[in-house]
Image (cartoon, grey):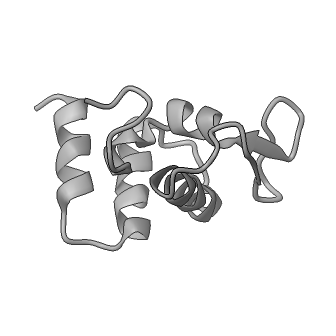
Amino acid sequence: MKSTEIAEEIAKAPMSIEDKLSWHLALFNRSIPQSMIPVLKEAIEIVNAGGDMEQHVDLPEDVLYKDGTTASVGVLMENFKLHYYTFPKEVGGE
């Protein structure tokens, strides 16, 4: 099974979004701290509410993006392959 197929199955699983994101991070990048889960959840919620992909969200204290403490929703969606969790599918979705 390909990682994209596994990611789709994780997204459909009957688990909390936090648990799904934990599995998702383990699948794609094991070095991402669990402290990113609330940030990624926030990015997904913004997209699903029709929010601005350029909106910046605060990163956890232990994470920097390009030496900054925020990242745009679009960057998070793209870098963490979060399109599996958006409705309708966004950024690289189907």
Q: Quadrant of residue 67?
A: top right
- Percent across and percent down for residue 73 are 63, 43
Towards the viewer: 2 or 80:
80
**Where is the C terminus found, in terms of image quarters?**
top left
User: Residue reaching furthest front?
Assistant: 50
- Percent across and percent down for residue 90 are 40, 36
- Percent across and percent down for residue 39 are 63, 58
- Write the residue at 42% across / 57% down: 21
Q: Is residue 91 above or below residue 47?
A: above
Left or right of 62, for residue 82 = left
- Percent across and percent down for residue 5 are 16, 36
Left or right of 69, for residue 49 = left
Left or right of 82, for residue 9 = left
Q: Quadrant of residue 92?
A: top left
Towards the viewer: 88 or 81:
88
Towards the viewer: 50 or 54:
50
- Write the residue at 73% across / 45% down: 55
The total number of labels drawn is 0
- Write the residue at 32% across / 45% down: 88
**Where is the N terminus found, in terms of image quarters?**
top left
Q: Is residue 36 above or below residue 8?
A: below
